[in-house]
Amino acid sequence: MAQVPVADGVFTFPAAEPQLIGSRCGACGIVTFPAQDSCPRCASMSMTEQRLARRGRLWAWTTQEFPPPSPPYAGPTGRDFVPFGVGYVVLPGEVKVETRLTEADPAVLTPGMDMELVLVPFRTDDDGNEVVTFAFRPVKGEAS
Ligand SMILES: [Zn+2]
């Protein structure tokens, strides 16, 4: 089964170690995700692409217990829907990213825990391709 990204320009693909694609303002230095053409803080147009850190720290989260409104949501619905974690991960010195989490059980998540970027299956498109999206998962086996 071929894999395709859920959208172009969101993360590097294909990549052994995928990175989110954000942007940095050449005038004030703020980092945004997703990438933007103009700076949300100073309105400068001098935005350049910045590939973001793959590791960050969990800031806040919840569990999505029902399918979000569609569009824009295009994932499984009805009996195929599986609750998933969503939250914010802070990439140090860069930006706070709103993201899907691989872990849906709030009991195993703790504030500030180390998280890393992964790509996860999202749905199967009409051509039989596996559509992948990004998520953050807890980093295991390391003291934080
Ligand atoms: Zn700016």
Image (tube, rainbow, N blue to C red):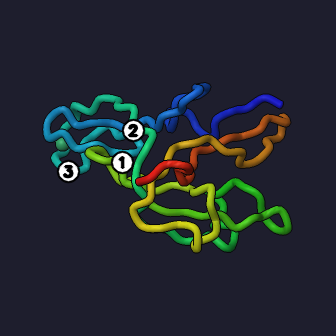
Q: Is residue 108 left or right of residue 51?
A: right
> Quick check: is the Cβ at mark 3 less than 8 Å away from ligand 1?
yes
Give the x, y percent position of residue 75: 72, 55
| Mark 2 residue type | Ala
Q: Are the residues flagged by discs 1 and 2 in contact, CB closer than 8 Å? A: yes
Q: Is mark 1 on a helix, strand or loop?
A: strand
* Residue occupied by mark 2: 53
Question: On the image, which quarter does residue 62 sit in?
Answer: bottom right
Question: Which part of the image, by quadrant, shows the N terminus?
Answer: top right
Residue drawn at 70 percent across, 67 percent down: 83
Label placed on residue 41: 3
Q: Are the residues flagged by discs 3 and 2 in contact, CB closer than 8 Å? A: no
Question: Which part of the image, by quadrant, shows the C terminus?
Answer: bottom left
Q: How far apart are marks 1 and 2 (CA)?
A: 6 Å
* Residue occupied by mark 1: 91
Labels 1 and 3: the sequence-earlier one: 3
Residue drawn at 69 percent across, 72 percent down: 66
Q: In this view, does 52 lie to the left or right of 6?
A: left
Q: Residues within 10 Å of mark 1 (few under 14, many from 20)?
A: some
Q: In this view, does 131 lie to the left or right of 116?
A: right
Labels 1 and 2: the sequence-earlier one: 2
Q: Distance between the residues labelled 3 and 2?
A: 21 Å
Give the x, y percent position of residue 51: 39, 32
| Mark 1 residue type | Leu
Work out whether residue 85 or residue 113 is closer to the camera in this orientation and state it. Answer: 113
Work out whether residue 93 or residue 73 is closer to the camera in this orientation and state it. Answer: 93
Question: On the image, which quarter does residue 130 sit in?
Answer: top right
Q: What element carries label 2?
A: loop
